[in-house]
């Protein structure tokens, strides 16, 4: 029998003395004091709380998901019970950093029915929240695939979240009931039409969004799931098995909190791995088929082949809350599975000072050398954890030292193995940055090392750092290795400062330190040698070297800790932008409205930067859209975000404008990365670059259903297009066959160099956003093109690229937001990661209309760049076609006005160029500035692209009759150095004298014929959740 109880009555029992364990609690939240606090907190009044004396979790109520799913009823918050004032989760504070978790039934999720969430508490002290739901499409994009695979209209789902007293895990049981009057086949007979008769077992599992800041670990892979999965994909099993990592559980490491997930399936006939013929796996093992961005997939259960009327099946799993390391998760997994264990415990000391080394990470390996566990040393340097009997080794990772060599130890059941660990002493670096007057000024100092010998141009994870043990990624220069040490460089560390000294640990060695402050400043360089236990001082003076008077630089796409895929604290977010010299920073967290202004004020950065409130409205199937400047409502958890699923773009645009700070007409809607995989707006609606119109999906099975799809739902109701996103040159320009072909695999028939690559239907294989914009301009549509960093962390540098707009007063405290709005709506913007272009055509600037006489108009182009940024050529594009390209001479010595004292020493100006633009009709002109030399080390390369879903599901997609990648390596290269690039918005030319520019039509992009460049096969959207996760990672 279950009975309801009050949390307020039970709370004192958690600290009282009693022979009976205190009961767990389940209740609907009626007060914000019952919520869980922390960087990932999403709970609201009306949600449901499960709590005992160990942990607290929140299940979202009905409605649209506040995480990154679609529906309510999912687990969204989790933390330990904390009694200290600094982390009192019972009072709304805490360390919750979990995003969301929900069951996946093939490609469907579940949606709670009306009144379908209930709470109960049992006589044994346990409590539960039960969610009753129906199957629902996670994506309308794959609705037809779902309908073919399984008929779920008669199925009822219940998800029971059960918490026992004194336990750190939630026992979750999902039950599927056939309430219909006929049997349901799982999968249905229709699956044969997709698999062509190949055997297929329906996978059931969980979609877990651990959230950024949680380092994911799995036994067998350690912290390197990304490359472990890539290796497994290359030799993946045949159907019915799926490619992926087979592991005992999956867990995370994080500050103050960790999370784990394990299967509770124990019967072979309910285990997905056993049902598909994996003879080495245990029934309760997990299959991890993908990990993208904040998403982790886990398959572990399989339904019966036939579910008869009124019959049901269930599968169990466990969600575990730990104290910040993997060991606190594995302890619980071993407890659940009843394995006999011993204990491994120890203390970590500094080998020189003998002081404890809190935060050190101890990673253990089993007798086969496979990653097994991880401990984080506490404030006293101590660690402990349970182990199965056997032989192991450990290594220690800590900031400022080289990872230790393996040390062996042995565990005996019911015994303790002690360890004393002595670590090397780190070196120290203390940096500060100043302006020419000696005033502290925000800046960035990059520590650059070089590796010994030739590494045969291998990726860094193979020789420079060990991701398995949890070492940090260290960017490489991506320059072909030679005997010259400057071709074998990596970044050891990056420090940002408000100008005042910042001290950090550094591994002993020789380095060069490069300090910078963005593209308007020079750099400071100094060579240093760091010794153990000693500190090196760097005091860098930086000078502005290009004249941008009257222009405001802005980054209008930034993420912080309020995005599911970023763990960058707000203070670090704003400081990182100030250090790059950007004037305006727009907050654009995923479905979360953030205000940076208080952080800027708290840090004393008002003289250096200003902020604007915005959002990136992030959908899963119709694109990503920024809205700004917005009102900030501090009340709701998501601060003003809204439901997007099932809604057409025009409605989303209207709602974004409805949040506008200055009203709908003075709110900018920006389409972000329109050609980024399945989450690019133009890709989702099959926008045709040649006609300038959206086209119907030709595939019957992949034609999306739902109220937001179809060409008629495509809307041009936006103001700006983010053409230049981060370092994603691969989605900027339409791909043409290169002069030098990439290595195999390649299509059997390769078009001639310079040809636009097309699929067998003649459609452009890899359209670029820049040419899309050209097409829209030719049609007479006036959209402003922008460039933004889409930064999520320090290595995704803020303001590379950035967008310049004209301003009456360009001093950050005096910047007028409405001037930026006006510029964004009227094509007065320059997108650049380095070169600064000032252009005039017929005496007018960007966004304006010049009058032509005698068939042409004169133009003047002035190019500037800092000494560390080399510009090689400027190109002129008229109506989408390259008309002229000219080399840029060596930089001339010039005074930049703001810094007359440095006129004799600074080299910054590339001079001005006069030219004539011939036009026979109304036209527009855009200028590009391009450099061929890397901007290293101030700007890092794009070195590690996201894991390609084609590798993961190629065999499955082939069985479905879908070719994921008919082009092989003949496609844009996503691995690239960051080279200088800038482009202007158009200057329009009135050639016929009627006082206005009118569209020229869609011709003139210089694209090759539809009959040229065709390759057998068709590039298509992939009907799997994994493609969505990959694309989400790409877009961030």
Image (cartoon, rainbow, N blue to C red):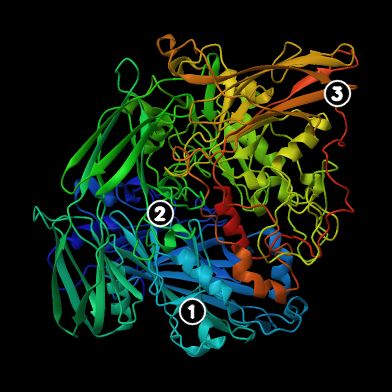
Q: Residue at x 38, y 73 (%)?
A: 219
- Nearer the observer, 606 or 615: 606
Q: Nearer the viewer, mark 1 or mark 2?
A: 2
- Residue 165: x percent and y percent? 27, 70
Would residue 106 be found to the left or right of residue 424 on screen?
right
Q: Secondary structure at mark 1?
A: strand
Q: Residue at x 69, y 34 (%)?
A: 718
- Residue 87: x percent and y percent? 25, 49
Other residues around mark 1 within 10 Å, as few (<14) / some (14–19) / many (≥20): many
Q: Nearer the viewer, mark 1 or mark 3?
A: 3
Other residues around mark 2 within 10 Å, as few (<14) / some (14–19) / many (≥20): some
Q: What residue is pinned by disc 3? A: 998
Residue 45 visible, this angle: no
- Nearer the observer, 136 or 957: 957
The answer to which image quadrant residue 968 occupies is bottom right
Q: What residue is pinned by disc 1? A: 315
Residue 427 visible, this angle: yes
Q: CA distance from mark 1 to mark 2?
A: 38 Å
Query: Extreme left residue here?
Result: 354
Other residues around mark 3 within 10 Å, as few (<14) / some (14–19) / many (≥20): many
Q: Earlier in the sequence, mark 1 or mark 3?
A: 1
Q: Earlier in the sequence, mark 3 or mark 2?
A: 2
**The N terminus: image quadrant:** bottom left
- Nearer the observer, 343 or 1: 343
Q: Is residue 608 above or below residue 741?
A: above
Q: CA distance from mark 1 to mark 3?
A: 63 Å
Q: Secondary structure at mark 3?
A: loop
Label ID, residue 473: 2
Q: Is residue 832 above or below residue 839?
A: below
């Amino acid at each position: 029998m279950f009975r309801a109880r009050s949390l307020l009555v039970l709370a004192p029992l958690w600290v009282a003395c009693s022979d009976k364990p205190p009961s767990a609690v389940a209740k609907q939240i009626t007060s914000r004091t019952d919520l869980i606090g922390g960087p990932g907190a999403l709970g609201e009044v009306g949600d449901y709380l499960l709590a005992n004396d160990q942990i607290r979790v929140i299940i979202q109520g009905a409605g649209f998901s506040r995480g990154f799913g679609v529906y309510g009823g999912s687990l969204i918050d989790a933390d330990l019970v904390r009694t200290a004032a600094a982390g009192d989760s019972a009072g709304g504070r805490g360390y919750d950093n979990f995003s969301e978790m929900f069951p996946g039934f093939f490609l469907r999720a579940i949606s709670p029915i009306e009144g379908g969430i209930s709470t109960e508490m049992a006589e044994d002290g346990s409590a539960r929240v039960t969610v009753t739901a129906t199957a629902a499409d996670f994506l309308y994009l794959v609705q037809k695939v779902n309908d073919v695979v399984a008929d779920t209209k008669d199925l009822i789902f219940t998800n029971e979240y059960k918490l026992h007293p004194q336990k750190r895990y939630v026992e979750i049981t999902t039950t599927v009931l056939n309430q219909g009057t006929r049997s349901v086949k799982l999968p249905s007979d229709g699956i044969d039409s997709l698999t062509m008769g190949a055997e297929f077992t329906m996978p059931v599992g969980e979609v877990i969004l651990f959230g950024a800041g949680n380092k994911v670990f799995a036994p067998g892979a350690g912290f390197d799931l990304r490359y472990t999965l890539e290796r497994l994909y290359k030799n993946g099993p045949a159907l019915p098995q799926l490619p992926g990592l087979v592991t005992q559980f999956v867990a995370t490491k994080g500050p103050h909190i960790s999370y784990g997930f394990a299967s509770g399936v124990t019967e072979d006939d309910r285990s997905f791995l056993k049902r598909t013929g994996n003879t080495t796996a245990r029934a309760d093992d997990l299959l991890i088929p993908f990990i993208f961005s904040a998403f982790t997939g886990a398959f572990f259960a399989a339904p019966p082949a036939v579910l008869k009327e009124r019959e049901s099946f269930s599968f169990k799993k466990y969600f575990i809350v730990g104290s910040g390391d993997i060991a606190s998760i594995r302890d619980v997994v071993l407890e659940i599975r009843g394995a006999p264990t011993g204990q491994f415990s120890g203390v970590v000391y500094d080998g020189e000072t003998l002081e404890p080394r809190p935060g050190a990470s101890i990673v253990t390996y089993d007798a086969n050398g496979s990653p097994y566990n991880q401990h984080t040393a506490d404030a006293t340097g101590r660690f402990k954890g349970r182990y199965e009997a056997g032989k192991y080794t450990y290594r220690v990772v800590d900031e400022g030292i080289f990872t230790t060599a393996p040390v062996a130890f042995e565990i005996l059941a019911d015994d303790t193995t002690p360890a004393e660990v002595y670590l090397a002493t780190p070196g120290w670096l203390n940096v500060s940055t100043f302006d020419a007057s000696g005033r502290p000024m925000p800046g960035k100092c990059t520590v650059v090392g070089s590796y010994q010998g030739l590494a045969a141009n291998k990726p860094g994870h193979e020789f420079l750092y060990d991701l398995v043990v949890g070492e940090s990624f260290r960017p490489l220069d991506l320059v072909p290795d030679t005997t010259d040490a400057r071709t074998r460089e990596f970044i050891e560390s990056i420090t940002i400062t408000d100008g005042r000294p910042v001290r950090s640990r550094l591994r002993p060695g020789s380095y060069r330190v490069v300090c910078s402050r963005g593209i308007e400043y020079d750099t400071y360089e100094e060579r240093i040698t760091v010794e153990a236990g000693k500190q090196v001082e760097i005091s860098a003076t930086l000078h502005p070297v290009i004249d941008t008077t009257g222009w405001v630089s802005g980054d209008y796409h930034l993420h912080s800790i309020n995005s599911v895929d970023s763990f960058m604290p707000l203070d670090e977010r704003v400081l990182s932008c100030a250090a790059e010299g950007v004037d305006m920073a727009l907050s654009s967290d995923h479905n979360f409205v953030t205000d940076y202004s208080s952080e800027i004020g708290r840090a004393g950065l008002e003289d250096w930067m200003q902020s604007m409130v915005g959002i990136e409205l992030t959908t899963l199937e119709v694109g990503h859209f920024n809205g700004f400047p917005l009102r900030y409502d501090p009340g709701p958890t998501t601060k003003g975000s809204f439901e997007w699923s099932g809604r057409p773009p025009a409605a989303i645009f209207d709602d974004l404008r409805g949040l506008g700070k200055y009203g709908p007409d003075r709110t900018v809607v920006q389409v972000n990365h329109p050609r980024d995989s399945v989450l690019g707006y133009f890709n989702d609606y099959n926008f045709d670059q040649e006609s300038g119109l959206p086209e119907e999906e030709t595939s019957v099975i992949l034609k999306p259903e739902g109220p937001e799809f179809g060409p008629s739902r495509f809307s041009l109701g936006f103001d700006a297009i983010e053409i230049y996103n981060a370092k994603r040159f691969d989605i900027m320009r339409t791909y043409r066959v290169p002069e030098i072909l990439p290595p195999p695999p390649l299509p059997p028939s390769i078009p001639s160099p310079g040809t636009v690559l097309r699929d067998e239907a003649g459609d452009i294989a890899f359209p670029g956003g820049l040419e899309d914009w050209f097409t829209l301009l030719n049609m007479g549509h006036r959209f402003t093109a922008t460039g933004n960093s889409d930064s999520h962390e320090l290595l995704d540098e803020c303001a590379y690229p950035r967008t310049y707009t004209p301003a009456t007063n360009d001093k950050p405290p005096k910047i007028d937001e409405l001037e930026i709005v006006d510029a964004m709506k009227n094509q007065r913007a320059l997108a650049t990661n380095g070169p600064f272009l000032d252009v005039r055509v017929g005496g007018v600037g960007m966004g304006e209309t010049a009058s032509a006489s005698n068939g042409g108009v004169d133009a003047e182009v002035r190019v500037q760049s800092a000494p560390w940024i080399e510009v090689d050529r400027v190109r002129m594009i008229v109506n989408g076609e390259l008309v002229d390209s000219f080399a840029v001479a060596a930089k001339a010595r010039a005074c930049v006005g703001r810094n007359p004292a440095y006129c004799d020493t600074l080299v910054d100006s590339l001079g001005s160029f006069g030219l004539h633009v011939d036009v026979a009709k109304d036209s527009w002109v855009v200028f590009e500035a391009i450099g061929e030399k890397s901007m290293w080390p101030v700007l890092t390369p794009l070195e590690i692209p996201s894991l390609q879903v084609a590798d993961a599901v190629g065999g499955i997609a082939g069985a479905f009759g879908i070719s994921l990648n008919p082009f092989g390596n003949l496609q844009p290269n996503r691995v690239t150095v960051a080279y200088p690039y800038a482009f202007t918005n158009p200057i329009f030319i009135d050639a016929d004298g009627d006082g206005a520019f009118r569209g020229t039509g869609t011709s003139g992009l210089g694209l090759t014929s539809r009959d040229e460049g065709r390759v057998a096969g068709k590039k298509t959207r992939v009907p799997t959740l994994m493609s969505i996760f990959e694309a989400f990672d790409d877009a961030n």
